[in-house]
Image: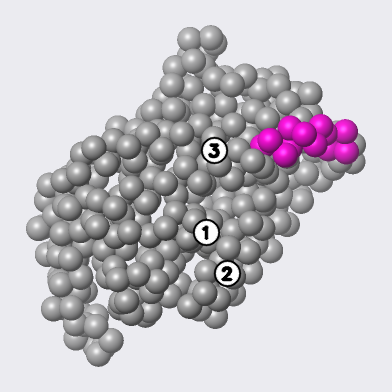
Amino acid sequence: MSGDGSRLWPIDPRTSVKIGAGFAIAIVLVYLLGAVIGWEETIRRLAAADLRWVAVACLSTLLCLAAWAKTWQIVLEAIDISVPYRELIVTFYAATFANYVTPMGQAGGEPFIAYILARDTEASYEESLASVVTADLLRLLPFFSVGLFGLGYLLFTAALPTGTEVFAALLVALAIGLPAVIVALWLYRGRVKNGILRALLPITSRTNRFTIEGVESRIEHLYESVELIADAPRALLAAVGFAYLGWILFALPLYFSGLALGLPVPLLLVCFLVPVTVIAGSTPLPGGLAAIEGTLIALLAALVAFSANEALAVTTVYRLTSYWFVIGVGGLAAFWVLARA
């Protein structure tokens, strides 16, 4: 069992303070957003929600994370790391919790999940991190393709309303640009490694906590692990299949939230709305709070002709079932993962 990742444990006192401050700011912003629209009417609508559809939305969220955990397990098996699925899924729930509560999302969850895997198995921290990064990249494929499919539906059925062009342009730019950047980073990995080492040289000369040689060894080990994964195309194809399944289940809670309130959102439009809100949620606040709510309310009003109260009600149910529900379940998983050391 490797302990190399222990120094990278992300939850320290300073991070905890940032998380607390981020939540406080975000909750105030969400409250003010609702106050402007009108919480009283929104709460009246929420009280009349069909709880069966709310439960279905929560179930879809759980199954989404289960599918993505399977994606990760397949990637791990490609580098000969075997972890029982029943254990891995709990670890994945815990990592999602870390992603959702940490400012800038992935900066918190990925080091957490790699640390836990290295602690609980014979995998090194670099192997663990390589599996996490690869699984994340595989999940980007359906994110972009589903988003572009939804955008195509929107363009086919109607012109883009004013204000949504920026989101559409960002989605297309990311769908084209991000894969190109990832490919370039891989093809020119030698130059990337040298660039990182040069950037860290002034730091290593002033500290004894790590050395250039150690960093170089870690980077090389990370690339070796990624190469092993890339050499298993059948496994990668299966992993992509579960990634797509996960993304469908990730998007469905918005559709079910509309049904719960008797305010249906076209299913194909959901394919556009969910990826766009994920992009909008890339803010320093945990879980994209306030940014996702504000964006989704505006888009529902513009694209589905909901009133502001209707849009706020649908958004509230959606975030309760896709975000706050995960915070609760993932938080319990995180406590369990930390306690099983």
- Residue at image location 54% in from the left, 11% down from the top: 158
Amino acid identity at mark 1 = Val
Residue 328, above or below 299: below
Front-most of residues 239 and 272: 239
Residue pointed to by mark 3: 250
**Lateral position of residue 7 relative to residue 308, left or right:** left
From the viewer's perspective, tell me whether residue 27 is left or right of residue 150: right
| Position in image of residue 333 (x %, y %) | 58, 63
Left or right: residue 173 compared with residue 34: left
Identify the residue at horizontal 21%, vertical 62% (top origin): 222
Query: Which one is in front in this view, the residue at disc 3 or the one at disc 2?
Result: 2
Q: Nearer the viewer, mark 1 or mark 3?
A: 1
Helix, strand or loop for disc 1: helix
Q: Residues within 10 Å of mark 3 (few under 14, many from 20)?
A: many
For the record, the magenta segment spans: 46-57
The answer to which image quadrant residue 161 occupies is: top right
Task: Note whether residue 273 is visible.
Answer: yes
Q: Label 1 vs label 2: CA separation?
A: 8 Å
Circle number at residue 90: 1
Q: Secondary structure at mark 2?
A: helix
**N-terminal of the two: label 1 or label 2?**
1
Q: Position of residue 56 (x, y in %)?
A: 68, 35
Label 2 environment density (alpha carbons within 10 Å; few <14, some 14–19, many ≥20): some
Q: For the residue marked with disc 3, what is the amino acid?
A: Phe
In magenta segment, residue 93: no
> What residue is rendered at 74% in x and 37% in y?
54
